[in-house]
Image (cartoon, rainbow, N blue to C red):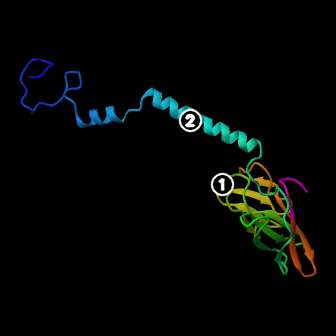
Amino acid sequence: MSAENDRPTTGTERPTTGTDRPATGTDRLTAEALTSRRDYLKLTVTVSGGLAAGGVAVAAGLFHRHGDGTAPPLRVADRIDPGAAVAFTYPGEHDRAVAIRLRDGTLVGYSSICTHLACAVLWRAERGPEGELYCPCHEGVFDARTGEVTAGPPPRPLPRVLLEDRADGIYAVGTARSGAA
């Protein structure tokens, strides 16, 4: 006998949902899959706390950014022809950089990590009178002579890599933060 309505059961009846209609497989699945308010609140507080802690860490400068610190001089190339570029890593082994000889002979160097979302920045010699540094991820464009943003979403210029043209080759000798000379 069923305790609900005092009638005998045969085992073939379908369970009900508390309303006049029988329960379906999706009713049971949905009811089991629901998250309680308490679980939702715990998740929300945890994620918010993590984002707040990460924001504080970034604001405090706890994470390494290209352009910070110094490193010993590194030979980049024997020479770089006008309009050409050489990719290298400096100051650390994971810090991608590019050395460029502009068409007028000026030697410049930059981090080749976009200041927007850290995508790779590419040298495009054929673009404009001096060429350009281009981030294909979000169409960011940087001026080849200054590293300043000329188009797209990057929030600041590329960090500079200081280069010296010596008798025995081209050397990276230091770094400067975005926008610093």
Q: Position of residue 165 (x, y in %)?
A: 91, 74
The residue segment tinted magenta is 174-181
Q: Is residue 141 above or below residue 75?
A: above
Q: Is residue 18 above or below residue 61?
A: above
Q: Which mark is residue 174?
A: none
Q: Nearer the viewer, mark 1 or mark 2?
A: 2
Is disc 1 in contact with disc 2, using a CB cutoff of under 8 Å? no
The amino acid on which the numbered mark 1 sits, given as a three-letter code, is His
- Return the residue at label 1: 138
Q: Position of residue 38 (x, y in %)?
A: 46, 27
Closest to the observer, 78 or 137 = 78
The amino acid on which the numbered mark 2 sits, given as a three-letter code, is Thr
Q: In the rendered view of the protein, which quadrant contains the C terminus? A: bottom right
**Residue plotted at (36% across, 36% down):** 33
Q: In the rendered view of the protein, which quadrant contains the N terminus? A: top left
Q: In what element is the residue under mark 1? A: loop
Left or right of 139 on screen, residue 143: right
Q: Position of residue 112 (x, y in %)?
A: 74, 63
**Residue plotted at (75% across, 53% down):** 64
Secondary structure character of the magenta stretch overall: loop
**Residue plotted at (90% across, 82% down):** 168
What is the spatial separation of the Cα atoms under label 1 and label 2, in whole angstroms? 31 Å
Q: In what element is the residue under mark 2? A: helix
First in sequence, mark 1 or 2: give its number.
2
Q: Counting other residues with Cα less than 10 Å from the Cα at mark 1, is it few (<14), some (14-19), or many (20 or more)?
A: some
Q: Position of residue 13 (x, y in %)?
A: 11, 30
- Return the residue at label 2: 46
Q: Is residue 59 above or below residue 92?
A: above
Picture quadrant of residue 125:
bottom right
